[in-house]
Image (spheres, rainbow, N blue to C red):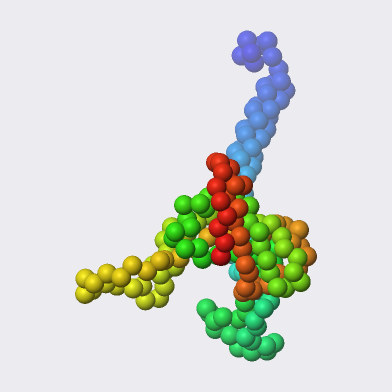
Amino acid sequence: LLKTHVGTQAQLDDAQTAVQQANAALVGADAQIAAAQANIGVLQAQRAESASTLASLQLSHDKALRDLSFTVLKAPYDGVVGNRSVEQGDLVSPGQKLAVIVPMDKLYIVANFKETQLARLVPGEKVKISVDATDGQDFEGTVSSLAPASGAVFSLLPPENATGNFTKVVQRVPVRIDVPADVLKSGRLRAGLSVIVAVDSRTAPSGSGSVASN
């Protein structure tokens, strides 16, 4: 434009100055972008370091909670301590027996019936239960289940017939009898008491029968 006398020298100078300023701004923008990218790398490294620190602190926290839990012994169920073998301040070892807990609300009766009486026993039958601890007041229970084998099979030294001589001995089979909740709540029963039970097979869910006692 200057050669054709359309523009002036001042206009040319202004245009060149504008181009130089634009180039300088572009260079500055590129520098800012590079700085920002470098800053992103720094922030990412800081984030990774923070995540590692957080994970380490979480592990320390979990270990502290676990160590704290080791200072408290929790029973697997509610009950009453019946036999404590340690005192406060005693040093104990892993697996050492510390106490016996009796779940008073989960007591049940095991009656050993003769095998000749099993034909008249089925789960669901009502049972008359007599316990000296209840001062002559009988209560009613329910046959829960029959053991899958006689008591002799589960003994420490089960009988063996190595000689081939056979003598028939009437075996006894453990029968579990559930105790009503209201009787358990009274707190009058204790584990290990002797009881007398009488099963009325006429109360069996499947039909009629007779009375079996133990």
Above or below, comparing residue 103 to residue 45 in the picture: below
Q: Is residue 68 visible?
A: no
Residue 106 location (% of width, % of height): 66, 62
Indicate the quadrant containing the N terminus: top left, top right, bottom left or bottom right.
Answer: top right
Q: Is residue 151 visible?
A: yes
Q: Nearer the viewer, residue 146 or 107?
A: 146
Q: Is residue 157 left or right of residue 137?
A: left
Residue under the point 71% across and 20% down: 11
Indicate the quadrant containing the C terminus: top left, top right, bottom left or bottom right.
Answer: bottom right
Residue 67 location (% of width, % of height): 62, 73
Determine which quarter of the picture holds residue 4.
top right
Determine which quarter of the picture holds residue 191.
bottom right
Residue 115 location (% of width, % of height): 44, 60
Above or below, comparing residue 55 to residue 167 in the picture: above
Q: Nearer the viewer, residue 143 or 58?
A: 143
Q: Is residue 176 left or right of residue 182?
A: left
Above or below, comparing residue 55 to residue 67 in the picture: above
Residue under the point 48% across and 58% down: 117
Residue under the point 68% across and 66% down: 130
Residue under the point 68% across and 27% down: 18
